[in-house]
Image (cartoon, rainbow, N blue to C red):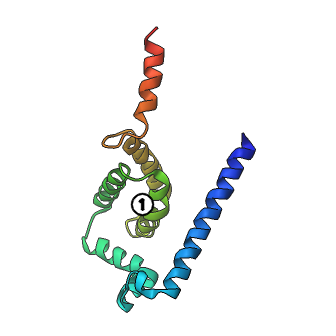
Amino acid sequence: MGLLMLALIVVAIMLAVLYVVYVIILAKLKPSLAPPLSEEERRVSLLGGQEIINAWVLSMDLTPVEFMIMAQIVIFLLGWPLEWTEIIVIFMPIFLPLLAHYNIDPLFFGILVALNLQTAFLSPPPLPCPPFILKEWHHHTLP
């Protein structure tokens, strides 16, 4: 079973890398197929996106408790359509630099995020986990 899983991971990584290389080559050869980005959009996405988000959040003049509530609501709502890995990789780097400004312990924030992600994982609308829970419940309660 271990070798099969390793083979699947290697093939998935190879496919992802080949797809990215294909898109880059195609965009270089036929720039009309790539989405047009202005110079300002390139600078925001590559060099200043985090600063813009930080300035926007800081401009709200939130208290530490209000920031925690806002961050947890955003993470909870994102937990419905996204898996926990996407939230951790994409959105935690947005929130982490703001923790120092609000004097929030990163360990405490991380524990709340983990708890929040599990709650969102078990909540509607998509319910990725409950079919397994219902199957186990049915198995243990009915003869």
Element assignment for label 1: loop
Front residue of 37/53: it is: 37
Dot 1 surroundings within 10 Å: few (below 14), some, or many (20 or more)?
A: some
Q: Which residue is the site of mark 1?
A: 104
Front residue of 24/66: it is: 24
Front residue of 91/30: it is: 30
Front residue of 38/50: it is: 38
Residue 138, above or below 10: above
Q: Report which quarter residue 91 is drawn in.
A: bottom left
Residue that extends furthest to the bottom in the rendered view of this protein: 39
Residue that extends furthest to the top in the rendered view of this protein: 143
Residue 36, above or below 81: below
Residue 91, above or below 22: above
Q: Position of residue 119 (x, y in %)?
A: 38, 41
Residue 19, above or below 43: above
Q: As drawn, is 113 to the left or to the right of 124?
A: right
Q: Report which quarter residue 20 is drawn in.
A: bottom right
Q: Position of residue 113 (x, y in %)?
A: 43, 51
Q: Residue at x 71, y 45 (%)?
A: 4
Q: Position of residue 82 (x, y in %)?
A: 41, 53
Residue that extends furthest to the left in the rendered view of this protein: 60
Report the label total.
Answer: 1
Quarter of the figure with the N terminus: top right
Q: Residue at x 45, y 51 (%)?
A: 83
Could you tell me the amino acid type at mark 1? Ile
Q: Report which quarter residue 124 is drawn in.
A: top left
Residue that extends furthest to the right in the rendered view of this protein: 3
